Image (cartoon, coloured by chain):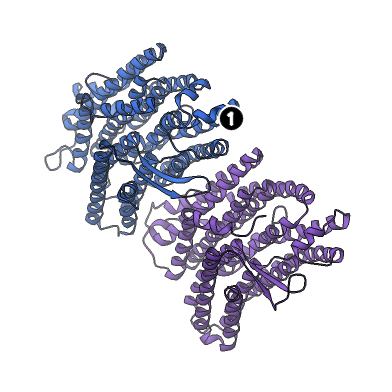
Amino acid sequence: MTWSSALPVLVILSSLGPGLVIFGLAEHRTRARTALNVAAALTKLGLVGIILVGVLRGEQFQARIPFVPGADLLLRVDSFALLFVSLSTVLWLVTTIYAVGYLEGSTQRSRFFGFFSLSVSATMGIAMAGNLLTFFVFYELLTIATYPLVVHEGTPAALRAGTTYLRYTFFGGALLLVGTAALYVTVGSIDFVDGGVLRSAAESSSRATLVFIFVLLLAGLSVKAAVVPFHGWLPAAMVAPAPVSALLHAVAVVKAGAFGITRVIYEVYGIRVAARLGLMRPVVVIAAVTIIYGSLKALAQHDLKRRLAYSTVSQVSYIVLGTALVGTISTVGAVVHLVHQGLMKVTLFFCAGNLAHELHIHDVREMRGVARRMPLTMLAFTLASLGMIGIPPLAGFITKWYLGAGALEAHAPWVIVVLLASSLLNAAYLLPIVYDAWFREPRTEWPGRTGGREIDGWLLGPTLTAAALALAAGVFAGTSLSPLGWAIRIAREEFTG
Amino acid sequence: MNATVAAVLLVPLVAALAVALVGSRAARYVAGAGVAATLASAIDLARRVERDGPAELHVGGWAAPLGILLRADGLAAVLSLAIAIIASTLGFVTVARTTGRETSAARFFAVWLFAWAGSNALVLSSDVFNLYVTLELVTIAAVVLLSIGGERGALRVALRYMLIALPGSLVYLVGVALLYGRYATLDLALIAERMTSTPVTWAALWLLVAGLVLKAALFPVHAWLPPVYANARAIVAALLAAIVGKTAFIVVLRVWPALPHAFAASAGPILGALASGAIVWGSVLALRQVRLRLVIAYSSVAHTGYLFLWFALATPAAWEGAVYIVLSHAFAVAALFLVSDTLERLGGDDRIEQVHGLSARLPLSFFALALAAASIMGMPPTGGFIGKWLLVRAAIETDQWWAVVVLVAGSLVSAGYMFRILRLALTTAGPIERVHAPLAGQFAAFVLGIAGFVLGLGSGVVLDLLAKGFTP
């Protein structure tokens, strides 16, 4: 095994190995667990850095392991994979630190961090999967590894949410399995290729078969991406602790679905074949419906995390929308939103976690004047909210700009109306919270601070870091290593491939 | 090579004899050595078949129509290796638990090794009569194992098992006799050459299949199986579910290629229909059980369905898929019975509630449970997934979408009944503390769980070996 084929495997092992060790650690060994977690996250960051430098130099990173007949397990790092890997790695580090603070004093932490590491390992596999079967393998592993996190608190509500989560995700997994198997039967081995695998095969297979398989794959992936009508699990899963919500909404799960949709459209079917089959317009419509529906539902929620969950339903479909519009510019918007939504949503969930942890606030109506007690948390919340709405120069603005321009490029101006409506709705469900927090009188006196800070540094640090990253992604969008710069690079590869 | 083939039969037989001779006090040491030696012989066989290809051994030096032919092909090598891993793991657990004071220890180990030798003989056999004889040997050994142990229900369980196994054998034997009367040989290849389509032949073939279906506990003749699994000693239940319960299917798989096309074409869909019934009915009943062992039992009923689904699909990839289900389910079910055993020792019974908080109380057992469950559900990258994948592919290839639906629905329901248990295991609300249970059983369950995982990740190697010398 050479260095370039070992690295992708090491990226997975750097969280899988420590995760397995953590399972074995006794509950009270907090320090050892934290040290191991952080060391693993930093190692992974280092490995990803090495790969990044290599990819910029034009090196290939690829590992192939024989698996079932006719299909290998293939790990490969292309630009798109690297984008997702980097996002998850950075957010894993931040979320791990946050989780250490959030779960201090709770039970079953070894199990929690063990499964957390497994979830991240599975996500790495999803990101680097070089063919549909490999993708599926890690996609299912992610379901299993995240379930214990969703039910972590063991309350009846958590268990119910876990069951809902499994019903949806296993159903999606089954559709994806059948779609994948059918595709292998129809076209043979399918490694992801820029521009799509089906270019030549499409002529020999019947249109009905290809459409049928496409529907199976997209429906299967839409479950994790929380596309309407497969979104029901996501609001239900908000009963999980805040770090788990961060994992579901930003680091791993919904991202895995959206990422998979992009892979299938661009690198399995290929945009030309997909467009010729007449598949893209229905997807655009479904994404648009999801965007509006999610925002409307968010507006109706009083529970903060539920509101944020519906916001994710809406925001993740931006990625689907941009992908399905089929144009260089909209693709940039889709790909970059994978990162932007992750950074902004992780910030918002950290803030929600801080409020719940420090002041036991769960309802948006309890947030009046809370900025006086927790100014830094609310500053982060405000930044991320403005970003979500799409105020320049924040990250969300970049996304919407490219999506809007992409809609014009794709001759679908009505999409701009959807984007505008969605922005207004975003403002309608986020700005009142911001306003209440900063400008209205609190109902009661807030409980005093402990140790002079608004909240423990383990919680505040990650929150501010995430907010700063979301800010930087927008402000420094013009540089070539920013998410935007990277997204442009990816879009160019997809369209010239 | 001849010696290698002979060794997988002779080593356990000699060991069985030795155990019986030394008596109960020293039995566990001799048995331990015998188990280790048999395991080594199976590993050796697999390595040689992998390197040199299939081998044949004519027992007594006579050629096929007269003598006994043992054929070590890829299927035999893989199966005997899997049997060895399971039988030795279970065997070592029993050795570790035996104190030397049990009066029945020598008898138990002797029969255990004998059953193992019988199973090895079965996977090496390739004529209808040999297959019958070895199937009977394994069945009888199982009955004896069920009756040992002295618990009150033991004898009743053994009888119940025998009452279903004997008619099954009898029906099969009548089929064999009819064939012999008609074609004057028992060799599968020779029968296939001479076979003509007459009512007697068809009746004989149907009897053959019916007898095996009964023994395999394929829906709708599965009702005898759950009570046996529920009441036997856990180690014996594990052996039954993992190895003995699979032998009838192996026999059908061996006999199938020799059957005339017309018969296979008409029997295949019927078996496929029964298999679908088994998957649906077994899975749904597994979902409703309150006892862990009955969940395992009904899951086994469902998995027998996956195996027999192959006869409707009948593509080469599908038979490998069916064998993969045999292997992965064998590992998983043995692991599950060991976990159940650990819980029974702690809590007194096998109600599902005993699993509550397992992830905190007994982490090792929890991981064994989780790994086995993943295999049963067909989660990647376990062996169960490889089996499911190959079967689903074959169903799509042959345009049998009903089978795709059955397979997918079956695996979704299996996720349902396994997660019903896993959810309880993860529920740690309330005062739950780590407890201590005998390590041997826990560790063995974990090893078998890992084996199911390795089976999936290493499928390239296993499938290569499997492809040597046998295609139905």
- Give the percent coordinates (x, y) of residue A143: 43, 43
- Give the percent coordinates (x, y) of residue B242: 58, 63
Q: Is residue A313 left or right of residue A336?
A: right
Relative to A320, say whether B12 is above or below: below
User: Looking at this view, is B300 or A296 the one in front?
Assistant: B300
- Give the percent coordinates (x, y) of residue B177: 83, 66
Relative to B450, say whether A196 is above or below: above
Q: Which tint is chain A?
A: blue
Q: Residue at x 17, y 42 (%)?
A: A457
Q: Is residue B386 left or right of residue A261?
A: right
Residue that mark 1 sits on: A205
| Figure quadrant of the C terminus of chain B | bottom right
Residue type beneath disc 1: Ser
Whether residue B13 is visible to the viewer of this picture, yes or no, is yes
Q: Residue at x 17, y 32 (%)?
A: A376
Q: Is residue B160 left or right of residue A167?
A: right
Whether residue B108 is visible to the viewer of this picture, yes or no, is no
User: Looking at this view, is B438 or B469 the one in front?
Assistant: B469
Relative to A343, say whether B441 is above or below: below
User: Looking at this view, is B251 or B198 the one in front?
Assistant: B198
Which chain is purple in the rendering?
A: B
Please state the chain letter of the residue tagged with numbered disc 1 in the rendered image. Answer: A
Relative to A396, say whether B82 is above or below: below
Q: Residues within 10 Å of mark 1 (few under 14, many from 20)?
A: few
